[in-house]
């Protein structure tokens, strides 16, 4: 495991949660790329912690779907193959578009203000992929909530959990972050106009663009990993 970014932990913070949060941030930021091995004993030594809280943090990350257990070999940052990513994004595109179409029929002033706040947050977070991802997710969550379907919300939550590590890879690209803001501006304008067709179309374009960037970034990471191992 490449541990250059994982410095010893500060003692004044709660240990198990510190380890979890540190690793989760490293995974979501791309510091620990998909496929990176996570060895409990090595991680405990690097972080200056005992193995019990490290083990608890790793089990929590496995439950969240960020790590895959590999038995005695420890864990790895979860990997989806390109075909799986492509399929999941096709499903996400259909569901997010449906959510936007439904929201356009029911959106109110309070939801529009909430969407504006998250869009402003994305603009302010242009240099912070972690914050950008949080506002991006919250923006889409507000659209789903406006549509009023709990079933749709559950289905999208499951898909997003499958893709969370890989979705973040797309936001590691500064150009993609700038495009994300423009794409969300178009979605918001369509919702404000009550135009369900336009809201669905802009949402589909946004998800498709994320998918294309993600597949490109995943291929680049795979190539760099192969070169490093050669």
Image (cartoon, helix red, strand yellow):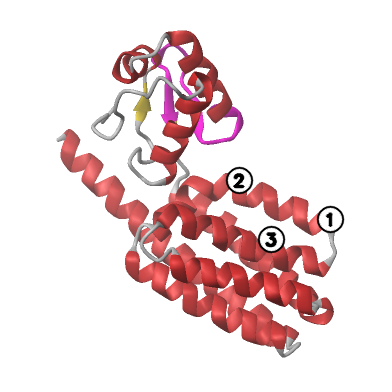
Q: Quadrant of residue 30?
A: top left
- Please state if 103 lies on the left or on the right of 87 as rendered: right
Task: Give the mark nearest the N terminus, 3 or 2.
Answer: 3
Q: Is residue 97 visible?
A: no
Q: Quadrant of residue 184?
A: bottom right
Q: Position of residue 226 (x, y in %)?
A: 22, 40
Dots 1, 2 in contact, CB < 8 A? no
Foreground residue among 188 and 226: 188
Q: Position of residue 229 (x, y in %)?
A: 18, 34
Residue 136 on the magenta span: no
Q: Position of residue 131 (x, y in %)?
A: 48, 56
Disc number lying in front (3 or 2): 3
- Please state if 30 lies on the left or on the right of 143 as rendered: left
Report the residue at 45% width, 67% height from top. Answer: 124
Q: Give above or below for 208 relative to 138.
A: below
Task: Give the mark nearest the N terminus, 3 or 1.
Answer: 3
Residue, disc 2: 161
Residue, disc 3: 141
Report the residue at 84% width, 55% height from top. Answer: 150
Residue, disc 1: 150
Which residue in the rendered view is the most extreme toward the left? 230
- Please report the bounds of the magenta region as a residue range: 62-76
Rendered-image quadrant of the N terminus:
top left
Disc number lying in front (3 or 1): 3
- SS for dot 1: helix
Foreground residue among 143 and 127: 127
Dots 3, 1 in contact, CB < 8 A? no
């Amino acid at each position: 495991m490449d541990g250059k970014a994982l410095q010893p932990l500060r003692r004044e913070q709660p240990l198990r949660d510190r380890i979890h949060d540190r690793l989760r941030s490293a995974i979501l930021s791309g510091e620990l790329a998909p496929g990176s091995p996570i060895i409990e004993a090595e991680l405990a030594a690097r972080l200056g912690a005992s193995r019990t809280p490290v083990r608890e943090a790793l089990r929590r990350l496995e439950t969240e779907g960020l790590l895959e257990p590999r038995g005695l070999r420890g864990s790895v940052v979860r990997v989806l193959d390109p075909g799986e990513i492509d399929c999941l994004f096709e499903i996400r595109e259909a569901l997010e578009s449906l959510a936007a179409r439904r929201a356009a029929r029911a959106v109110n002033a309070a939801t529009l203000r909430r969407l504006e706040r998250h869009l402003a947050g994305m603009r302010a977070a242009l240099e912070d992929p972690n914050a950008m991802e949080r506002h991006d997710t919250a923006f889409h969550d507000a659209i789903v909530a406006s549509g009023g379907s709990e079933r749709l919300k559950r289905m999208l939550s499951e898909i997003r959990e499958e893709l969370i590590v890989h979705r973040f890879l797309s936001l590691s690209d500064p150009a993609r972050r700038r495009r994300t803001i423009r794409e969300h501006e178009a979605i918001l304008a369509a919702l404000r106009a009550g135009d369900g067709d336009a809201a669905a179309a802009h949402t589909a374009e946004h998800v498709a663009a994320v998918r294309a960037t993600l597949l490109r970034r995943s291929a680049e990471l795979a190539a760099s990993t192969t070169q490093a191992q050669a």
